[in-house]
């Protein structure tokens, strides 16, 4: 599966690796812009289709230890109780701020 993205097969799965803030959404209407920003979206040139969207993230933080979490498609809220009794809450949208 990951060979299409040139990603290693041993990437951790089923964990949160870090967090970031989504600050913008970019729409790619021209192949020129798609090609100019390949270092940002990391997709192959031949995958361009007019109207694709890309998300811009800032303030990325990698956790010292991965946090086990079952994933889902799309953005989703996370509510995890740690082994030390701490409640970790992460929200997917601004309506929770």
Image: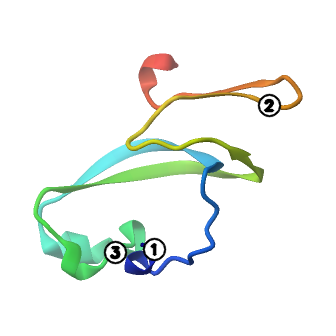
Disc 2: which residue: 82
User: Is residue 86 found left or right of 22 in the rendered image?
Assistant: right
State if disc 2 and disc 1 touch (CB < 8 Å).
no
Please state which of residues 46 and 60 is positioned toward the viewer in this rendering.
46
Crowding around mark 2 (Cα neighbors within 10 Å: few <14, some 14 to 19, many 20+) is: few
Against 68, residue 45 (above or below) is below
User: Is residue 5 found left or right of 21 in the rendered image?
Assistant: left
Question: SS for tag 3?
Answer: helix
Disc on the earlier residue, 1 or 2: 1
Mark-to-mark CA distance, 2 and 3: 38 Å
Judge depth for marks 1 and 3 and give the one in front.
Answer: 1
Seen as rendered, the residue at the extreme right is 84
Question: SS for tag 2?
Answer: loop
**Where in the figure is residue 9, as x and y percent of width and height?**
56, 75
Disc 1: which residue: 2
State if disc 3 and disc 2 touch (CB < 8 Å).
no
Disc on the earlier residue, 1 or 3: 1
**Where in the figure is residue 43, as x and y percent of width and height?**
33, 73
What's the coloring here? Answer: rainbow
Mark-to-mark CA distance, 1 and 3: 18 Å
Against 2, residue 85 (above or below) is above
Please state which of residues 34 and 85 is positioned toward the viewer in this rendering.
85
Q: Residue at x 27, y 52 (%)?
A: 26
Disc 3: which residue: 38
């Amino acid at each position: 599966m990951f060979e299409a993205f040139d990603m290693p097969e041993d990437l951790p799965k089923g964990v949160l690796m870090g967090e970031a803030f989504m600050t913008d959404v970019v729409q790619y209407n021209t192949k020129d812009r798609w090609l100019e920003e390949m270092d940002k979206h990391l997709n192959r040139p031949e995958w361009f289709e007019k109207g694709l969207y890309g998300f811009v993230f800032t303030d990325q933080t990698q956790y010292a230890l991965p946090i086990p979490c079952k994933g889902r498609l799309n953005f989703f809220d996370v509510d995890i109780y740690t082994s030390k009794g701490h409640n970790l809450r992460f929200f997917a949208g601004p309506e929770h701020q």
